[in-house]
Amino acid sequence: MYIRFFKPFSDILTSCLILIVLSPILVITTVIISIVNKGNPFFFQKRPGRNAKIFKLYKFKTMIDAFDQHGSPLPDHLRITKIGSIIRATSLDELLQLINVIKGDMSLIGPRPLLVQYLDRYSIEQARRHLVKPGITGWAQVNGRNSISWQEKFQLDNYYVKNVSFLLDLKIIFMTLKSVFKRSDINQSENITMSEFMGNN
């Protein structure tokens, strides 16, 4: 009952309320990023959702488009802007995913949607993370985020899949708010993002 009815309803209602309340901040952020990046302030990327169905994820753009002589993107720490660092530290870049929640692509809480190219690298157990909608925050995010290994992250994701409930979601919400205010576990060491998941071999 909770997963099928109450959780989707509360996701949409809460997302709409947050977007309305934070709309001035979203508008200001959009303008600032547009000026800094001299272009599109938004970042779009295909991600797998529930049952590995592909959807377009929305985020604020925190990096510039910069490439090496071979046409490959430069490392994250060379591309992220100063304002982008602030936006990531405050998790403002994730707020646009509330639109994904309203569209039904995501939930407020669930395993984070990872890259499409990871789909054929998962073990059968790891692939269970796609039995529920991906979330803006989740059990792995409040228990280490980018400071834990891929294996630990997947174990935490599967724990959530097996134990999803109203009380667990409520706990994750409070832990997320605490983490944002403390600005903890944003980066792994000196890296901006997790290293690429290459599979289990």
Image: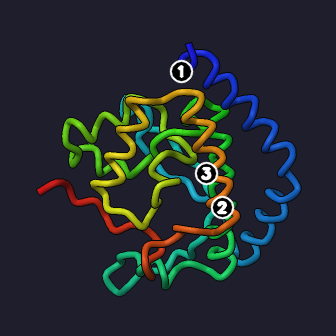
Q: Are marks 1 and 3 in contact (CB under 8 Å)?
A: no
In the shown orientation, is residue 104 left or right of residue 160?
A: right
Circle 1 SS class: helix
Q: Earlier in the sequence, mark 1 or mark 3?
A: 1
- Decide: few, some or many residues near mark 3? Use Cα within 10 Å; few <14, some 14-19, many ≥20: some
Circle 2 SS class: helix
Q: Residue 175, labelled with which disc?
A: 3
Q: Is residue 39 visible?
A: yes
Can you give x and y, in whole percent of width and height, for residue 43 in the image?
A: 58, 59
Can you give x and y, in whole percent of width and height, for residue 135 in the image?
A: 53, 41
Residue topped by disc 2: 180
Front one among 100 and 91 = 91
Q: Amino acid at mark 3?
A: Met
At a point 59% along the width and 31% down the height, the residue shown is 167
Circle 3 SS class: helix
How many marks on residues?
3
Q: Earlier in the sequence, mark 2 or mark 1?
A: 1
Front one among 96 and 38 = 96
- The quadrant the C terminus occupies is bottom left
At a point 22% along the width and 60% down the height, the residue shown is 198
Can you give x and y, in whole percent of width and height, for residue 29 in the image?
A: 78, 65
How far is mark 2 from mark 1, CA to CA?
26 Å
At a point 56% along the width and 39% down the height, the residue shown is 109
Residue topped by disc 1: 3
Q: Is residue 41 visible?
A: no
How far is mark 3 from mark 2, CA to CA?
9 Å
